[in-house]
Structures are given as C-alpha cells and as structure tokens.
Amino acid sequence: MAKDTPYLDVQHLSKSFGSLVLFEDIVFSVAEGQKVGLIAKNGTGKSTLLSILTGKEGCDSGDIIYRRDIRVGMLEQSPVFDPQESVLDACFNHEGDPEKVLKAKQILTKLKIRDLQQPMGQLSGGQQKRVALANVLITEPDFLILDEPTNHLDLEMIEWLEGFLARGNKTLLMVTHDRFFLDRVCSVILELDDRTIYTYRGNYSYYLEKRQERIDNKRAEIMRANNLYRTELEWMRRMPQARGHKAKSREDAFYELERVAKQRIEERQVRLKSRNVYIGSKIFECQYVSKSFDISPSQGEVGGGSLVILRDFYYNFSRFEKMGIVGNNGTGKSTFIKMLLGMVPADSGKFDIGDTVTFGYFSQEGLQFDENQKVIDVVKDIAEYIDMGGGKHFTASQLLQYFLFTPEQQHNYVYKLSGGERRKLYLCTVLMKNPNFLVLDEPTNDLDIVTLQILEEYLQDFPGCVIVVSHDRYFMDKIVDHLLVFQGDGVIKDFPGNYTQYREWQTLQPKAAVPSKNSTDTESKKDYHNDTRRRMSYKEKREFEQLTAEIEALETEQRQIEDALCSGTLSIDELTEKSKRLPVLKDELDEMSLRWLELSELCP
C-alpha cells in the first residue's frame, strides 16, 4: 500500500439507534503526522464514533479503512483492568526487558503513578485512567486514538502531556473538551454537528473563526431560501394538479427548497441572568484552620505518616468573589471545599459562614439518578421555576432548554442519557436550587464545549459568589479573578489573577533548589515523606542542560523543515534533501528525549 495512503480513511459512515440518527454518510480522513481534535455536543455520538473506529461497535453502513502497516493505540474513557494485576503488568507485556521497564517507569512517573507493583484494584478510577494513558504512550503506536485524555490529570500532568503529544511526528485523533489543549496540540479540528462532519484545517482558535463563518453563511442561505420559498409556495397553491414536465421539475425543486428553508440553527436568544439572588456582605472567614490525614504505609513499606492539607490557614472571602483553586492531585483541593461545606471536620480552627449564604455544590462524584425518571421530572422535583426578579420566572423546562436539552430530550428517560448529558442534568439540578454561592468541583469533566461556553456565560453573569476547582485552564481564565494555589504540605499561595497570569508570574520566579515534598501524587500514598532518588551528578547536570538546548534546537529545525515542505517553493533537490533529513531528526529527538526523561527523574 502506498505511503501517502491516509492512516485512517472513513467513507460514507452512518449510525443510528432506532429513530435517532447520530451521523449520516460522513466522510473524513487522518493523514500521517496529523493531530486531529474531534468536537461535538454531548449525546451526538463522539464516543460511539470512536467505538466504531476501533471495532467495538458496528455501523449501519460505510467503510473504515486503516493503512495496512500501522499499529493503533486506543485510550478509552472508562478503561477496565484485572484488579489483581500489578501496575507494570497492566501496562504491557514487558517480558523483563530493562529498556521497556525504564520507559514505562519514566512515563508512569510523569503521570504520578510510582508503585509499579501495586495491584490495579487498589487504584482510584482516576489513577486507572492514567495507567491506561501511560499504556498507550509506552507502546508507541503509529496512530493514537484518545477519548478525553486530560480527565483525571492535574495541571502539571496536562502540560507535560501537551508537550509530549505536540513533539515529533505523532499522529492522533482525540476527543477532548480542553480548549487550551486543542489549541496547542491539534492541527485539524473535526466538528460532528447536525449528523455530519465539518473539517477545519487549523487549531481551535482557527476553528472558532471558521465555524462562525460557516454558521453565518448557512444563516444567509436559509434566509434566501425562505424568501424564495414564499414565492414558490404561492405558485404551488395556484397551479392545477396536472402539470407538465417543466412544472414537475419546478415542483421537485420546490421540495428541496422547502427542506433548506425549514432548517434551523440552534441559537440561544438570551443569556440567563438572575437578578433575584441576594447575598450579604459577610460570606465566610476561614479562621486559622488546620487539617491533616494519617497515611497508612503501602505494601512493603514500614511506618506511615501524615498528609497535611491546611496549616493554620486564614482567608476572608469577599462578596461577589470568583475564586479558582488549583494544585496537583492530592494536595487537598476537594477536601478544602468539603470542609467549607461542613462535610469534613477541621482538626482546629473553623469556617465562619454568613447567615445569607446558600451553597450550590457540584461535586466530582455526581448525582445518582432514578434511571426510570424523565429528565424534566428530575429538575421539577427540585423546583418548578427560578424567580428571576421583576416578576419574571425561569421554568424547569426553560433551564433545561438553555443547557441544550430539547423538548423531546426533556421527556426522555434518564437511562437514555450519555455520560456527558448526565453531568449536564446534574448541573441543572444544582442551578435550579437558585443558590447565591456556587462551589464547583471539576465541573468541566465530560461536558461538551458548547455546554462549557453556556456555563461560562452563566457564571460571568452570576450575581453571587463562585469557587471553582478545575484543571480546565481556558474555563478558569474566563471565570475567576483570583486563585488559591495548593502547593502541598499545607502551603497555599494566594494569587490575585487568573491561571494564565499565574503561570506567567511563575515563569519569572527563580526555580526552587529542592522540589516540594508534596509534588508527588499522594493518591498513591507512596514516597510522600522521603525522596530517596539519588541526586544528579555535576556531569549529569551539564548533560541535562545540553540535552534541553539540543532538543529545543532540533524541534525548531523540524518545524522549519515541515513549513518548508508545505510551502511549495522548494526545488526537487531541496525537497529530497529535507525529506531525508526529517526521519533522521525524529530518531535523534526520540533518542535524546528518552535520555532527557531518564535524567529528569533524578533530583537536581
């Protein structure tokens, strides 16, 4: 098979469930070296499409053609492991190969999984997803298919993965709601909308611009069709039933025109602004609160220790404040908000909460629904309407429609909802209580980008207080004006600004000589107190610095060659020379990156 054959070629693919058509006659391809992001609203078939592409589910019609000589690696949204199997054995059949084991350890460590002999059954769901991600990366397939790879990663891990995937000539197809990630990694965006696929050859920012152009053009087409439809409808009503050949052609054209004219572009005409939310001047005061947990020793270890979350922490929350909470996994972000909500007791100190505060809490764990209840009834059980002030009301149905539940979907049963739609319904139940203080713990997980944009608008206009724990940098930048940065071991930095501003400030600070002892993922509860890794020698430190500079230079050269090859201005000799240099560059980068990873695991 020719080398210019696409890695994946999808031809005229259709899939439906009963009367529900997910997509119809869709066509797209993924070429070697392309990094493709797939975007769609919840419930429109993203995960189903990935399942079809990987052979886990059948299609109604169409062809899926992979290049014959490639290996495909798939990251599922909810991977399943043998609970008795060790982390290392769950990753891949390493057969005792020291080089494979070393690579596995390096990537697992970057994803903060350090005990390679720990049984998978002892890991949390988030840790298991990270092991599955490591497995896909370790085996180095030619073509990566990733379903929500950033879920259950903290910001540090996301930024590492961003760099890992962006580097080199990797080929990937990815579903993610992380818009920073899409912007920095992907070179092509596929949008699944209205049962078809639209292709945008650029990153997420380019997609936003071109999508709006597409919608504007579609709107103009529908408007023209509507104007002509009125004229043709009058002709249809006047004409007798017996028509000649020319009249019959015009009649056929009329029905096609009618189809275009009756198309609708989903738009929300109003932003949901509640004016009937009152909150007093006293919100909450965190009065010198301390909190720690005892850590049981892992298998094979002696003794335990304590995990410090807060250490005499004081903070006075302001009226109308919109705060973001960030930090590595295990530093206590979720514990902090559960203490604020009275769900976890403090060891000392207290939270003094204002009398007018009414919390609305959106948790990571979600809500257990009655599967046989209708969607509209789930929300109506909380309230029939929200009082918007000024005599206006927002009904349960209107709230659901605002968050893109159609009237038909509102009368469906809960068991028919996708995972993302369930998260969206849970969000609606929180908002229907009309709180004046929203506490949102990872609200962006499993929500589609359109829903995230709606939620961002809602929170920007929200007249109360907001605390958001999230790894979604784009979302945080839109919402928060203030950060609490959980750095581990009870150390919390108070930063006035959003996440991007914090990262810019952070790059200007001198690097600490010794890493924080809580920089590990404390979910695994291993190596928390004592960092027993050997330190980098002077020679290794010089090698590490040199490798960093050389990798950067090679990546710059690679980008320049790729740009030149796409320019169409090269002579045949130049084209041949640069085409030969590119795979050599890739090999050099892979070899240097492996050594860089190895050295990066040593203490500086």
Image (spheres, helix red, strand yellow):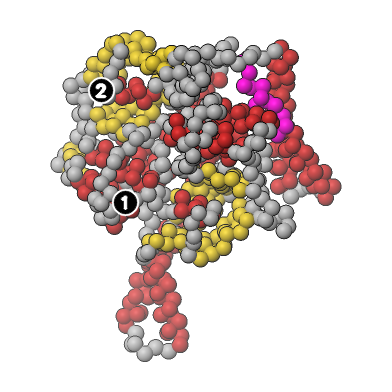
- Label 1 to label 2: alpha-carbon separation: 32 Å
Q: Which amino acid, mark 2?
A: Gly
Say which residue label 1 marks. 415
Residue 553 versus residue 245 in the image, above or below? above
Residue furthest to the left in view is: 391
Magenta stretch encompasses residue 596? yes
Residue 191, horizontal then vertical, whole percent: 49, 51
Q: Which amino acid, mark 1?
A: Tyr
Chief SS of the magenta region: helix
Q: Residue at x 30, y 47 (%)?
A: 402
Would you say 103 lies left or right of 248 here? Answer: right
Q: Residue at x 51, y 28 (%)?
A: 118
Q: Residue at x 72, y 32 (%)?
A: 591
Q: Which mark is residue 342?
A: 2
Q: Marks 1 and 2: CB-CB under 8 Å?
A: no
Residue 412 versus residue 169 in the image, above or below? below
Q: Which residues are magenta?
A: 590-604
- The disc, 1 or 2, on the residue closer to the chain's N-terminal end is 2
Q: Examine the rendering and report whether any part of residue 441 can be seen.
A: yes
Q: Examine the rendering and report whether any part of residue 453 can be seen.
A: no
Residue 193, horizontal then vertical, whole percent: 45, 55
State which quarter of the image contains the C terminus. top right
